Image (tube, helix red, strand yellow):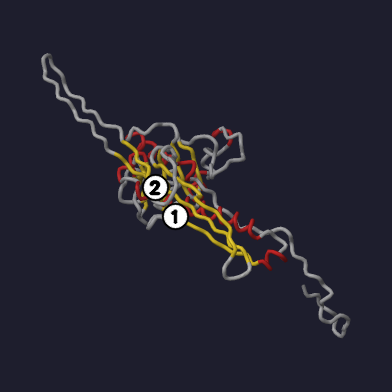
């Protein structure tokens, strides 16, 4: 720090009498919440040992029912043993190094700080990649609106995005969510464990002065300490509601929202290895970690996407 001197004042002219003080606190970067662990299931996790491991899931056979009359010779149906395969086909790593001199004279534990940052980076990448994958698995039958810059107040349109808002000719967020619930109802999706994920702009409109849905009195949210991006502890239109900046971007619409049932997608995730070692190139330690994961949409009919425009 430089302290200005009066013109002509020459005592201690270099300013070295002012000591530099390094704070013991570290300014950490802001972290996004992760929602994938709350909206997918790990029913078929199995034992992940290495990259490329698979979990094979047998599908329930579909039985055909036929008319019967007295004396009819019955036809025996062969049972199908179709399967789905969840493959651990994604691998991500981190590696960093701290020189011995840096470790000796540093006023912070840089290894501990960096490991915390690496853990967040792996989780954030996992969350982003799985949400993007799920968006690509949603069938057109479960799409509300269209990925278009053109907007409409017609909730049934398949050629324009929903014009989100409360004005004339606009679709309210609640109406949007009601249509998403209807899509899942049409597919016989269970009513419990449904979820809805959208970016902050969607929830900003939902919290508009014309909407009371996020009020604690109406949502019965008595716990303000919500975690994992939960918007409210109550349900809105039967959905657990989440806010996430990792929702994939739309191409033409302002944004999109994902909705579905927890049975739609299964995930398997594991930190396979973390280790420290001496560097061969300099005096110091290297630390690295390996994250393995897989994801598989098992029931596309219980997964949907909705596109909206905010003007």
Query: Where, quadrant-wise, is the C terminus in this rendering?
Result: bottom left
As helix, strand or loop, the secondary structure at mark 2 comes to: loop
**Which residue is rendered at x = 66% and y = 66% of the image?**
100
Q: Is residue 187 above or below residue 29?
A: above
Q: Is residue 58 left or right of residue 119?
A: left
Earlier in the chain: of badge 2 and badge 1, it is: 2
- Give the residue at mark 2: 53
The spot of residue 169 in percent (x, y) is: 39, 46
The spot of residue 250 in percent (x, y) is: 40, 55
- Dots 2, 1 in contact, CB < 8 A: no
Residue 284 picture quarter: bottom right
**Which residue is rendered at x = 61% and y = 34% of the image?**
222
**Viewer-side residue, 89 vs 196:** 89
Residue 25 picture quarter: bottom right
Q: Is residue 281 above or below residue 246?
A: below
Q: Is residue 58 left or right of residue 69?
A: right
Which of the labelled discs sits on residue 159, or is there none?
Answer: none
**Viewer-side residue, 170 vs 183:** 183
Q: Residue furthest top?
A: 70
Which of the labelled discs sits on residue 91, or is there none?
Answer: 1
> How many numbered marks have been drawn onto this rendered protein structure?
2
Q: Is residue 304 left or right of residue 31?
A: left
Q: CA distance from mark 2 to mark 1?
A: 12 Å
**Viewer-side residue, 214 vs 107:** 107
Residue 14 picture quarter: bottom right
The spot of residue 205 in percent (x, y) is: 50, 47
Query: Where, quadrant-wise, is the N terminus in this rendering?
Result: bottom right
């Amino acid at each position: 720090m430089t302290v200005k001197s009066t013109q002509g004042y020459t005592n201690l002219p270099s300013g070295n009498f002012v000591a530099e003080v390094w704070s013991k606190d570290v300014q950490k970067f802001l972290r996004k919440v992760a929602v994938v662990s709350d909206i997918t299931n790990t029913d078929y996790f199995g034992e992940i040992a290495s990259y490329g491991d698979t979990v094979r899931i047998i599908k329930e056979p579909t039985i055909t029912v036929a008319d019967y009359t007295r004396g009819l010779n019955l036809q025996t149906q062969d049972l199908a043993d179709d399967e789905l395969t969840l493959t651990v086909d994604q691998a991500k790593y981190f590696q960093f190094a701290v020189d011995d001199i840096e470790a000796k004279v540093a006023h912070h534990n840089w290894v501990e700080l960096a490991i915390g940052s690496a853990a967040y980076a792996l989780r954030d990448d996992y969350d982003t990649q799985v949400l993007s994958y799920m968006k690509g698995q949603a069938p057109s039958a479960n799409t509300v609106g269209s990925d278009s810059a053109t907007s409409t107040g017609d909730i049934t349109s398949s050629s324009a995005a929903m014009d989100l808002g409360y004005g004339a000719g606009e679709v309210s967020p609640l109406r949007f969510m009601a249509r998403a619930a209807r899509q899942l109802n049409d597919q016989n999706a269970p009513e419990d464990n449904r979820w809805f994920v959208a970016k902050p702009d969607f929830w900003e409109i939902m919290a508009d002065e014309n909407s009371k849905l996020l009020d604690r009195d109406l949502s019965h949210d008595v716990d303000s300490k919500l975690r994992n991006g939960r918007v409210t502890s109550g349900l809105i239109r039967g959905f657990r509601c989440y806010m996430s900046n990792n929702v994939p971007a739309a191409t033409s619409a302002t944004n999109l929202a994902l909705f579905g049932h927890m049975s739609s997608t299964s995930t398997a995730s594991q930190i396979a290895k973390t280790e420290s070692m001496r560097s061969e190139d300099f005096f110091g330690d290297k630390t690295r970690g390996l994250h393995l994961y897989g994801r598989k949409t098992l029931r596309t009919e219980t997964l949907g996407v909705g596109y909206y425009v905010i003007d």
